[in-house]
Image (cartoon, rainbow, N blue to C red):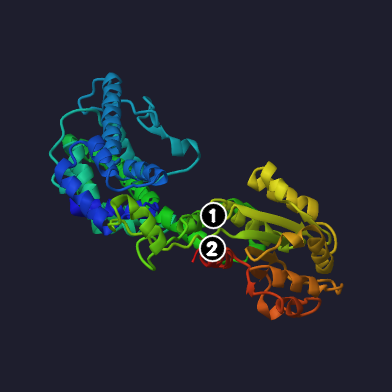
Amino acid sequence: MERTLANFIQVLRNAEVRVSPAETLDAMTTLELVGYADRKFLKHSLALVLPKTVDEKVAYDAAFDQFFRFEEVNNKALQNDSSSSNDDGDQEGEEQQGEGNGEGGGGSAAETNPANGKRKSKSKQKGKQKPNNLQDEEEEEADLGPGPMTESTSELGKLLMANSRVELAVRMAQAGEAVNVKDIQIFTQKGLYARRMMDAMGLSELNAEISDLGESRQVPARRLGQELKRRREWLREEVRDYVERQFLLHADVSGKRLREELLRTVKLSNVEHRSFRLIQEIVYKMAKRLATMHARRKKVFKRGALNVPRTLRHNMQYDGSIFDLHWKSVKIDRPKVFAVCDVSGSVANYARFMLMFLYSLEEVMPKVRSFAFSSDLAEVTELFERNDLEDAINKTLHEYSGGSTDYGQALLDFKRMCLDDVDNRTTIIILGDARNNYGENRQLILKEMYDRAKRVIWLNPESKNAWNAGDSVMRVYGAYCHQVEECNSLMHLERVVGNLLKQASG
């Protein structure tokens, strides 16, 4: 019982449902009270102690349905198998010609030729010849009709012939535990784990019994061998389904996490267009995590310096007796951010995801003004106010990415448009490679921005080894920045924005 719950909690954690040790103990207590008898009641009971947010409840519902669905699948599959076996038996019985040895017509896969007693198999119709011994074995199987069968001697054979769905489900789960199927990592391992599970359930002993029954001269024994073959194939399919469900529960989530980890560290200029959608999901997830960390303004209420005037005023209603204490608190203002992005050439991809990141933090950074340039600078804040985030970014890149890069002209335009709006609460983030095409630098304008703003942060997507090489003037501009960072991946971007929020709220 405890192991099953522990495996389920591991699945929840893989699905990004946060479950603490204390909540795990609560779940165990809940399980002791409700048990596994009522699946729906168990689901609702555990839902009270494990998931917390709306997103976690959705993930919990999906994980629970997947984790505890094996019994339903086995029920349905085994019923279908039994009904199909009966249907085949009825058809064979109707088509019997009265021979004492039970010879009759085949199913849909083969037909018996009355003239020579040989049947035409599908593979033969396709022009593929089978060895004589396989043909003889298939002819014997096709000729056997319904009737009495001997008792199975192998443990797995007895289980299959007993039609015990619950015992089969339990045996399958035990085999999965024995081979550690939850450790599956990639989809190509599904066949390997399915074979290991079949071996753990007793496949070798079953195969030996089927081989002995096929060599028997008694029709009931051969009929049992035919039935065991049919049920062995059904079991193999069920085991494959079980392994696939375990893959979806464990490895598929881990694989997605590995892909996300890779995309967090890869250079954004190397990302293929087909991966943009996944990167956008990662950006939103990262932004949501940062927003959760910094959404509440940090105030000191129950510790620190005592606010004596406020304490005395509040306690005048108690005739001067001190009942309620008030402490000095510091109100933290949210940062006012100016984002200036070079959208020319390969730098455009970096600008795309930085703007997406900043505007996804609207809850904790509502005062973002964005500017785009390749030569002339233009404010694009209204584009983001009127359009969806993705549409606004695409329009920005489409309208302002042309032209030769001119950082001097962009700084001049910034001074003319909004330098007066920069104050000691403003953080200016400049994203660009500082390659000015040997134009005028106008670094004194950047110095004015440096003197007025709280922080000037320059994010350069190029490697530090390439700074100041060729037409790059990073050394000139870096002298008038509070912080200069290499930023060419989502991981770099998350660290920079996280530090910005931490400095604003700390």
Above or below, 255 against 461 in this view is above
Identify the mark at residue 186; answer none if there is no mark: none
Could you say which is closer to the camera, residue 113 or residue 211?
211
Q: Residue 334 appears at what percent x and percent y?
A: 56, 58
Give the residue type at disc 1.
Val
Q: Quadrant of residue 73?
A: top left
Query: Of residues 159 and 468, which is closer to you in this image?
Result: 468
Left or right: 90 in relation to 375? left
> Quick check: 369 above or below 210?
below
Q: Amino acid at mark 2?
A: Leu
- Residue drawn at point x = 29 percent, y = 53 percent: 319
Q: Report helix, strand or loop for mark 2.
A: helix
Residue at image mark 1: 364
- In the rendered image, residue 370, in percent from the top left (x then y), is placed at 70, 56
SS for dot 1: loop
Asked whether residue 473 appears in the rendered view, the answer is yes
Image coordinates of residue 223 in percent, x first then y, are 21, 35
**Residue 192 in picture, x, y percent from top left:** 36, 57
Q: Which residue is drawn at the image coordinates 64% and 47% (left, top)?
A: 389
Taking the view exactly as shown, the residue that stands out farthest to the right is 439
Disc 2 target residue: 501
Residue 203 in view here: no
Residue located at (24% from left, 20% from top): 98
Q: Earlier in the sequence, mark 2 or mark 1?
A: 1
Direction from residue 16 to residue 210 in the image, left or right = left
Real-space CA distance between mark 2 and mark 1, rounded to the nearest whole angstrom: 8 Å
Q: Residues within 10 Å of mark 2 (few under 14, many from 20)?
A: many
Q: Tell whether 209 sits left or right of 359.
A: left
Frontmost residue, 402 versus 78: 402
Query: Is mark 2 in CB contact (under 8 Å) with mark 1?
Result: yes
> Is residue 109 or residue 15 the one in the foreground?
15
Counting other residues with Cα less than 10 Å from the Cα at mark 1, is it few (<14), some (14-19), or many (20 or more)?
A: many
